Amino acid sequence: VENYDFELGRVKREIIRRKAKRVLVQLPNGFKKFSKWIIEELEGVAEMFISASHTWGPCDVDFKGAKTIGADLILHFGHHPRTGYGKKYGVDVIFIPVFYLGKVYRGVKEVIELLEGYQRVGLVASVQHVKALDELKNSLEEAGIEAQIGIPREPTMFKGQVLGCDYSAALSLADKVSAYVCVAGGLFHSLGLALTVNKKVIALDPYRDRAKDITIEREKFIRKRMYKLMEAMEARYFAIVVSTKVGQYDLYSALRIRSALKEKGLRSEIILTDEVDAEKLMDLMWPDAIIITACPRISIDHMDNYPIPLINKGEVKYLLKGDLSSYDPVDALK
Ligand code: SF4
């Protein structure tokens, strides 16, 4: 707990200011272990409940659970959205980013070594680590590397913040830098960045205090993706998956894709689900390939869990053309 800022002072004040009586606490899987401590810290402020549902991102708020128990506020820890939800879905929600407070030493040295020959770099981070970017910028500049922090398209996001499906902060520097450093746990955000910018990307993982050039991971991904798309071009019957999660729901795209496939003489059915889960979808038995209109990272990060190709709505145009010669991996993130 001491390495993270759960902002419970602010949270407590907000619960009281909003006069919330019944509160649902929602945390990503890695933070669920802190739920008991949070509830204890907020004891007596309101009636507290814990949601055990998955929460993959700020697009995945448990409004359904909150409404079912009559909660008037959701505390959503660990994510920060592109745009606030307000009370649009009937329940108020507060996002608490949970900034990481730990220090990075060896990883920064490794970043400087890996950036040899690069003079201008862009810096971005997942929300937990945006606070580390100013210090990283100073360290790089002391080493003679000009560093800039990207500005996201949405003003509600933090300076330098990226999401698994939003790298606008990095793109804001596209003409100014020749490499990027992405501060985040694991390679999830760095891989998305590398698919978006096609420049050298260094992943700096503050939890392991290590840095890594992920050019090889990018190339491996593209090769695998092209293979999956080639397989999907042979498919005749498609499942088009629509998620009921509020921030991922996209029936409009699903209907558009269904018409486009029909024009090409290809059959498809639209499948509605909350969680996009391999076991559940493979029970259908009939699809030759699956098109995901929900979170684009499902088919990037989980494609190995499916025996049939899983592709994203942004990649459907290649299926329709039957040609991959102009394939751009950024379409895998759409
Ligand atoms: S990457 Fe997926 S889980 Fe993350 S914010 Fe985007 S849609 Fe949501």
Image (cartoon, helix red, strand yellow):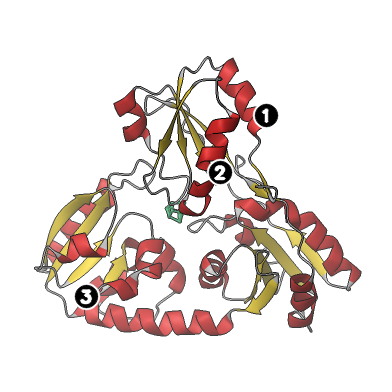
Instruction: Give the mark nearer the N terminus: 2 vs 3.
Output: 2
Between 334 and 185, the one nearer to me in the picture: 185
Check disc 2 and give the amino acid type: His
Q: Position of residue 135 (x, y in %)?
A: 81, 58
Lateral position of residue 273 relative to residue 27, left or right = left
Question: How far is mark 1 from mark 2, CA to CA?
Answer: 18 Å
- The residue wearing badge 1 is 9
The yes-or-no answer for disc 3 within 8 Å of ligand 1 is: no
Q: Is residue 177 above or below residue 14?
A: below
Q: Position of residue 168 (x, y in %)?
A: 58, 56
Place residue 185 in its image quadrant: bottom right
Question: How far is mark 2 from mark 3, CA to CA?
Answer: 33 Å
Numbered circle sitting on residue 308? 3
Check disc 1 and give the amino acid type: Gly
Quadrant in which the C terminus is drawn: bottom left
- The residue wearing badge 2 is 80
Disc 3 packing (10 Å; few <14; some 14–19; many ≥20): some
Q: Is residue 195 above or below residue 89?
A: below
Instruction: Give the mark nearer the N terminus: 3 vs 1.
Output: 1
Q: Position of residue 331 (x, y in %)?
A: 41, 67
Instruction: Give the mark nearer the N terminus: 1 vs 2.
Output: 1
Lateral position of residue 148 relative to residue 214, left or right = right
Q: Is residue 249 above or below residue 261?
A: above
Check disc 3 and give the amino acid type: Ile
Helix, strand or loop for disc 2: loop
Place residue 292 in its image quadrant: bottom left
Helix, strand or loop for disc 1: helix
Mark toward the viewer: 3 or 1: 1
The yes-or-no answer for disc 2 within 8 Å of ligand 1 is: no
